[in-house]
């Protein structure tokens, strides 16, 4: 039982409001926790429990609460970065916090006896060598990441015609993600606009989408009647500053729907646009060749449509880039299932033959058959193979005006031209998407990230860990220890990942969680029980 009295502004009392409290009141967020140390700063508090957990709350203007943001926290929240550290001492200054442990970790200095089975390629390397390599990689990152501003990340060519990406491609995979992301976040935070609650108000008509869907699947001409198309058309009225907000970049008014957008309407518009991109309402994405043929990997993934080249399409691709940038800046994940080669190109990496095989398993074997075929010149001519190559959407593309058919003499050139075309067929679309991203985030810094790292920055984790959701959960009108809450979490535990995604869509308008607790940025998961809903079994949940 913990009680406080006095001023409650800046949420320093941990009760979820800024009301002054004249008498000691229990801090509900710490109920059931045995607190062994507590400290107070000027406008914030920190405590630790006998289990080694650290909780902070109050003002956070200098990031003193340890969640990676500068957003105030209304109730005690677990500091996820200190989990497992067995903290038993805390202290505060006016705007800083210290936490430390006087006990030695039980596993300090210990290594596993053998390489875990899932790391098959490392099985023959001694454990001590792997440990030393990890330490070296951390040291390299610590030396390099603070010096990132000294490097040219724009991709300018040197005297030999080589760009810096040659070196950065080698660095991407060995720099520790945390170091790169800290440098990236510093630039994002420095350019954040914090003087408004939300961006411009936009009207979106979801009712017209079904009415305007053509037999080909598009919502209106080139998908312009879709929510994505409507939003893209309104982008020209957005000021550059409005794209740099830390949360709602626009406020939504759905035509013919009684939605008061306090955040849910904005999230729903984002989720709706992600769905439209992948269900055929817009022309920007296509399923992979493996998906069309129902064979190989990445069958459920999408590629940028190489046939979408009009000025309208390019403008749509730029808006797609804006959406990706907003997801990174706000920490609000998108539900987009793009194939890995797409993320590589968006990160500034060049595609390889292996990337082509990832999305079209029959393409390279078909070329090798032509290159290595032992047929005679007459037999080759009898095959009458056209000098064309199918693009990612299945359309045949003429590779040269010089040749009509593949012959024994020109087959080597055909293979070279075919591979070169497929490696670069998305270049225009990728450039447009990156141009849109550059309106929101520092695109040159993406040269330090791998495609997978960029995907997790945009889309979050496909897994939905309940411990992360629990760490940002707060309760109103009910105690955390109540049977109803215990039943709720038991049901969530029993859900499959797909069911958890559907639950998130219901309560948040998104299907993925942010990757870390820092990316929640003050967006608590609130479970509230209202007295007016009585008896409770007669009512359905609301969000």
Image (cartoon, grey):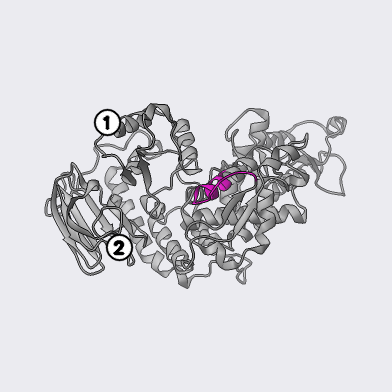
Q: Which residues are magenta?
A: 256-271
- Residue where numbered disc 2 is placed: 10
Q: What percent of the width, then of the height, locates residue 224? A: 73, 48
Residue 96 visible to the viewer = yes
Badge number at residue 201: none
Give me the disc on residue 483: 1
Whether residue 164 appears in this view of the structure is no
Q: Residue at x 63, y 61 (%)?
A: 435
Residue 21 falls in image quadrant: bottom left
Residue 328 image point, x, y percent: 50, 55
In space, the residues marked 1 and 2 are separated at their CA atoms by 31 Å
Element class at badge 1: helix
Side (left or right) of 227 relative to 375: left
Q: Relative to residue 95, is residue 380 depicted above or below?
A: above
Q: Quadrant of residue 432?
A: bottom right
Kind of element beneath mark 2: helix
Q: Does the stretch in magenta take in 258?
A: yes
Between residue 528 and residue 40, name the one nearer to us.
528
Q: Earlier in the sequence, mark 1 or mark 2?
A: 2
Q: Residues within 10 Å of mark 1 (few under 14, many from 20)?
A: few
């Amino acid at each position: 039982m913990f009680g406080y009295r006095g001023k409650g502004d800046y949420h320093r009392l941990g009760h979820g409001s800024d009301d002054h409290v004249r008498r000691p009141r229990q801090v509900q967020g710490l109920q059931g926790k045995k607190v062994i140390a507590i400290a107070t700063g000027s406008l914030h508090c920190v405590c630790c429990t006998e289990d080694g957990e650290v909780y902070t709350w109050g003002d956070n203007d200098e990031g003193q609460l340890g969640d990676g943001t500068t957003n105030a926290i209304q109730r005690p929240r677990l500091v996820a970065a200190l989990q497992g550290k067995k903290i038993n001492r805390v202290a505060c200054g006016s705007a800083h916090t210290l936490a430390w442990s006087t006990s030695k970790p039980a596993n300090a200095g210990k290594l596993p006896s053998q390489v875990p089975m899932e790391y098959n390629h490392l099985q023959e390397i001694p454990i001590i060598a792997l440990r030393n390599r990890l330490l070296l990689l951390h040291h390299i990152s610590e030396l390099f990441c603070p010096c990132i501003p000294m490097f040219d990340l724009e991709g300018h060519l040197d005297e030999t015609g080589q760009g810096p990406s040659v070196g950065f491609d080698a660095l991407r995979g060995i720099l520790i993600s945390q170091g790169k992301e800290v440098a990236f976040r510093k630039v994002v935070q420095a350019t954040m606009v914090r003087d408004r609650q939300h961006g411009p108000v936009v009207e979106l008509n979801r009712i017209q989408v079904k009415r305007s869907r053509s037999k080909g699947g598009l919502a209106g001409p080139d998908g312009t009647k879709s929510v994505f198309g409507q939003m893209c058309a309104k982008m020209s009225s957005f000021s550059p500053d409005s794209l740099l907000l830390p949360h709602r970049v626009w406020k939504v008014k759905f035509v013919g729907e009684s939605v008061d957008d306090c955040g849910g309407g904005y999230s729903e518009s984002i989720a709706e646009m992600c769905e439209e991109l992948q269900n055929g309402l817009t022309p920007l994405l296509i399923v992979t060749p493996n998906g069309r043929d129902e064979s190989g990997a990445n069958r459920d993934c999408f590629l940028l449509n190489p046939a979408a080249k009009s000025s309208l399409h390019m403008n749509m691709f730029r808006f797609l880039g804006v959406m990706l940038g907003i997801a990174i800046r706000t920490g609000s994940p998108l539900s987009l299932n793009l194939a890995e080669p797409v993320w590589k190109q968006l990160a500034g990496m060049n595609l390889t033959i292996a990337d082509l095989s990832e999305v079209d398993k029959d393409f390279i074997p078909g070329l090798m058959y032509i290159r290595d075929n032992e047929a005679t010149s007459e037999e080759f001519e009898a095959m009458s193979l056209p000098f064309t190559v199918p693009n990612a959407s299945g359309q045949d593309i003429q590779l040269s005006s010089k040749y009509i058919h593949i012959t024994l003499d020109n087959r080597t050139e055909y293979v070279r031209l075919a591979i070169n075309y497929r490696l670069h067929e998305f270049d225009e679309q990728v450039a447009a998407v990156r141009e849109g991203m550059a309106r929101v985030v520092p695109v040159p810094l993406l040269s330090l990230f791998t495609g997978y790292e960029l995907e997790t920055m945009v889309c979050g984790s496909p897994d939905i860990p309940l411990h992360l959701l629990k760490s940002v959960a707060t309760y109103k009108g009910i105690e955390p220890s109540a049977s109803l809450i215990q039943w709720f979490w038991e049901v969530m535990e029993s859900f499959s990942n797909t069911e958890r995604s559907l639950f998130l869509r219901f309560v948040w308008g998104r299907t993925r969680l942010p990757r870390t607790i820092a990316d929640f940025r003050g967006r608590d998961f609130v479970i509230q029980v209202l007295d007016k809903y009585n008896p409770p079994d007669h009512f359905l949940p609301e969000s």
